[in-house]
Amino acid sequence: MRPDNRSPKPDAPVYEGAERLQKVLAAAGVGSRRACEDLIFRRRVTVDGRVAKLGDKVDPATAVIHVDGERLQVDTRLVYVAMNKPRGVVTTMADDKGRNELAEFIGNRVEQRVYHVGRLDADSEGLLLLTNDGTLAHKLMHPSYEVLKTYLAEVVGPIPRNLSKRLLAGVELEDGPVKVDSFRVVDTLGKSAQVELSLHEGRKHIVRRLLAEVGHPVTRLVRTSIGPIRLGDLRTGRIRRLTNAEVAALFHAVGD
């Protein structure tokens, strides 16, 4: 028998921290390892833009993985938290004026250091997202990604019938025009009313300034959603970790 003088094919590069792809998918909650192997076999998984194959290894800290087109976060160092911010709490982790701050509510319930995504003024309440994923946080806050935010506001009434049309068309403020993406009256309470509005603006006090400009000052303001994430029944002052599906939905909202 003649000796085989062919050079062996080089193995695929293995990076520090690399793990079997199916193990990484399973750890991220996609399913059992066998189910994840089936997803890979059916070409439903991509890694860094390429269709994955059985036997692939990835570094969870750097790999960009999609399953059925949805971005999957597999870096266990990254955390995503929703909070129901109470009224009177400033949106900062450390306030030099001694006011109530976010750190009092986060405490040791989140081991990693997290940062708030955008702000709610001290007199406003409701949904606030916190994360240590700086890239996603930047995209969620940047106006070019047009991530919708929805608010419930108690305002001075009564509400005229043409207010929705006016807000949808746009209102001129001192720093430029603003218009809502949706508006509806939820309830009327004597001389006050509860309204819901959605917009992708992120300017300071934009909701309060907008409603004041059209003659309906806000007496209470609650943010109820940011993109696909909803406040739901999360109690005031409480926090919760986002689910894998919610994190994937946030990536989808910014086009990742």
Image (cartoon, helix red, strand yellow):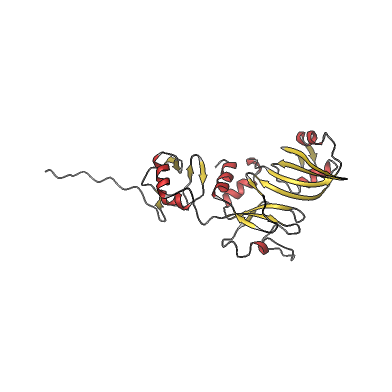
Q: Residue at x 61, y 48 (%)?
A: 138
Q: Is residue 11 visible?
A: yes
Q: Residue at x 72, y 58 (%)?
A: 90
Residue 203 image point, x, y percent: 72, 46
Question: Can you say whether 99 is above or below 37 in the image?
Answer: below
The C terminus sits in image quarter: top right
Q: Is residue 179 visible?
A: no
Total number of numbered discs in the rendering: 0
Question: Can you say whether 69 is above or below 138 in the image?
Answer: above
Taking the image as shown, residue 248 lies to the left or right of residue 26, namely: right
Residue 187 image point, x, y percent: 80, 43
Residue sitting farthest toward the left: 1
Residue 22 image point, x, y percent: 41, 49
Taking the image as shown, residue 25 lies to the left or right of residue 89, namely: left
Residue 99 image point, x, y percent: 74, 64
Res 107 → quadrant = bottom right
Res 101 → quadrant = bottom right
Taking the image as shown, residue 217 lies to the left or right of residue 74, namely: right
Q: Residue at x 37, y 51 (%)?
A: 14
The N terminus sits in image quarter: top left
Q: Residue at x 74, y 50 (%)?
A: 222
Foreground of the two, 40 or 52:
40
